[in-house]
Amino acid sequence: MIEEGELVLLYNSENTQYLISLPKEGQFSTHKGIISLSEIREKNFGDKVLSHTQYPFYILRPTLNDLVMKTKRRTTIIYPKDAGYLLLNSAVFPGAKVLEVGTGSGAFTIVLANFVRPNGKVYSYEMREEFLELARENLMRAHLLNYVELIKRDVAREGFSEGEADCVFVDVAEPWELVKWSQLALKGGGTFASISPNIEQVQKTCRTLELTGFVRIKVFEMQKREIMVRLTGTRPKERGITHTGYLVFAQKVNREE
């Protein structure tokens, strides 16, 4: 049985799928008919439900990728292809203390919160109140708000309100402005990561990292290509997400007195 409030992916096809928080009762309207939500509650994940026009929808447990791609958004998000590599090259683990600058819609905040739980915390900084409210809504829907503290603050001017962090993530237009504050807020050996769309931003960020006591400075760009598998004519899709940003990584070392 599926509980009230659980997140459910109603899947008909790649072009027709819906992420919903299951209410106690009611109906969900789609262009392929109306689905009874109370009927879904009587089923299990993996079962099928029919719309009133007899179109089948499978009841699936959403993946983290689904949560990210189906967030309500007013900003560009960090896409899963970048999020995975950011996590693998940063000190994110259950119990970690993570600082994020540039909450935006909260898509990457959802990813971070998922990996620091049950006893870690993400401190996410944003200057615009409307973005914080949207991120709060997305985190609540994902049932991850308990692992996040949303903070309205201009970190470039005021610095972080938290210290002794395991890692810092920066997604703002001028990431180099956050490097000195990251150096102060991170533990020794803590990781810094940023994402920028333009190479000039990357150059300035890397130079600032070099001058501020960071090592292992590296830059990557992630490419993803989906393959259409057929009996004949298997090939890559013509369209897809290509360049989204350059990923910058570094680690803090302790300065000698």
Image (spheres, rainbow, N blue to C red):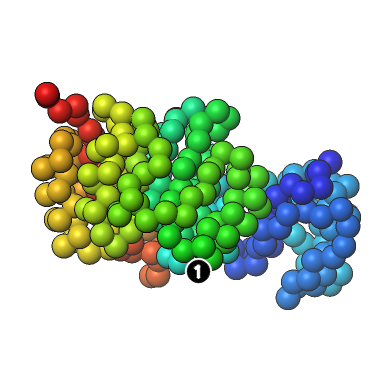
Residue 193 in the image, given as x and y percentages of width and height: 30, 45
Q: Quadrant of residue 9?
A: bottom right
Who is closer to the viewer here, 229 or 17? 17
Q: In which quarter of the image is residue 31?
A: bottom right
Q: Which image quarter holds the C terminus?
A: top left
Compared to 54, does 215 lie above or below?
above
From the viewer's perspective, tell me whether residue 171 is left or right of residue 34. Answer: left
From the viewer's perspective, tell me whether residue 69 is left or right of residue 84. Answer: right
Residue 167 in the image, given as x and y percentages of width and height: 35, 36
Q: Which image quarter holds the N terminus?
A: top right
Who is closer to the viewer here, 208 or 257? 257
Q: How crowded is mark 1: few (under 14 residues within 10 Å), some or many (20 or more)?
A: few
The residue that appears at 20% across and 48% down in the rendered structure is: 219
Residue 38 visible in the shown view: yes
Disc 1 marks a residue whose amino acid type is: Arg
Residue 114 in the image, given as x and y percentages of width and height: 54, 39
The residue that appears at 42% across and 54% down in the rendered structure is: 153
Looking at the image, which residue sits at the far front? 158
Who is closer to the viewer here, 30 or 68? 68
From the viewer's perspective, tell me whether residue 133 is left or right of residue 40. Answer: left
Element assignment for label 1: loop
In the rendered image, which residue does mark 1 sit on?
A: 74
Residue 221 visible in the shown view: no
The residue that appears at 65% across and 63% down in the rendered structure is: 17
The residue that appears at 31% across and 29% down in the rendered structure is: 187
Residue 152 in the image, given as x and y percentages of width and height: 47, 55
Looking at the image, which residue sits at the far bottom? 31
Count how many numbered circles sit on residues in the image. 1
